[in-house]
Image (spheres, rainbow, N blue to C red):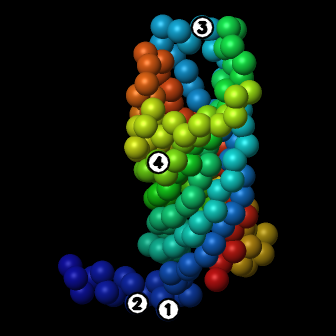
Amino acid sequence: MIAGIFASSALIAQKGHHTAFGIKSGINFSTLRISGSSSATLDAKWKTGFVLGAFVKIPVASNFAIQPEFLYSSMGAHLKSSTSSEDRYRLNYFSIPVLAKVKVCKKLMAVAGPQVDMMIEAKKYNSDGYSKVTDDFEDHDILLTGGFEFWPLRSIGITARYIHGFVDINKSSNLVMKNQGVQITLGVKL
């Protein structure tokens, strides 16, 4: 079995498929899916955030690869209540998506996989200024992400993907909050 793994790796390397490293940066469009007893009085709006990090593409076959990523990701939402002013939440995460990549055609790949987010810091902004609210949120999230990568040039690619959270990240009330977002990034293979 071990000999088979080494032989497969040697064949992939001979065909020009090798591990690639790179960096990526882009923008998150995110919101919070809200439910619970007081959710009817809240309106969640989308906010923009920043994403920056690195990736490692590990080829498994000529049309399939695994790609772990290590990202700083700013998520959150604008929440407006019928009784108060708008609160803007910025949730900063260290994100680790592990993507399966399937080649659709020469320059286009479908990507999908699980993602684990670990909370770095959470802040709330409103008319009174800002406050740290990290303790009001769970220190982790489990998500699923999927989308497409387009590589118009050999070393430069664009990724667009949807991110769907499964963990209720709100610890401070009866309100259930789950992350949701769309991420668009520009990647460069090094």
Q: Is residue 145 visible?
A: no
Give the mark nearest the N terminus, 2 or 3: 2
Residue at the limit of the structure toward the left, as seen here: 1
| Residue labelled with disc 1 | 14
Q: Position of 118 compared to 184: left or right?
A: left
Q: Which residue corresponds to the image point at 45% horizontal and 28% vertical from the top-left?
A: 170
Amino acid type shown at disc 2: Ala
Secondary structure of residue under mark 2: helix
Q: Which residue corresponds to the image point at 40% horizontal and 43% vertical from the top-left?
A: 139
Asked if the residue at tag 2 contacts the one at tag 1, i.e. Cβ–Cβ closer than 8 Å, the answer is yes
Amino acid type shown at disc 1: Gln
Give the mark nearest the N terminus, 1 or 3: 1
Residue at the limit of the structure toward the front, as seen here: 128
In the image, residue 39 sits, relative to residue 160, either above or below, namely above
Amino acid type shown at disc 3: Ala
| Residue labelled with disc 4 | 119
Inter-mark Cα distance, 1 to 2: 6 Å
Asked if the residue at tag 3 contacts the one at tag 4, i.e. Cβ–Cβ closer than 8 Å, the answer is no
User: Which of the two discs, 4 and 2, sits closer to the camera?
Assistant: 4
Give the mark nearest the N terminus, 1 or 4: 1
| Residue labelled with disc 2 | 10
Asked if the residue at tag 3 contacts the one at tag 2, i.e. Cβ–Cβ closer than 8 Å, the answer is no
Q: Position of 87 compared to 59: left or right?
A: right
Local crowd size for mark 3, using a 10 Å CA cut-off: few (<14), some (14–19), many (≥20)? few
Inter-mark Cα distance, 1 to 3: 59 Å
| Residue labelled with disc 3 | 40
Inter-mark Cα distance, 1 to 4: 41 Å
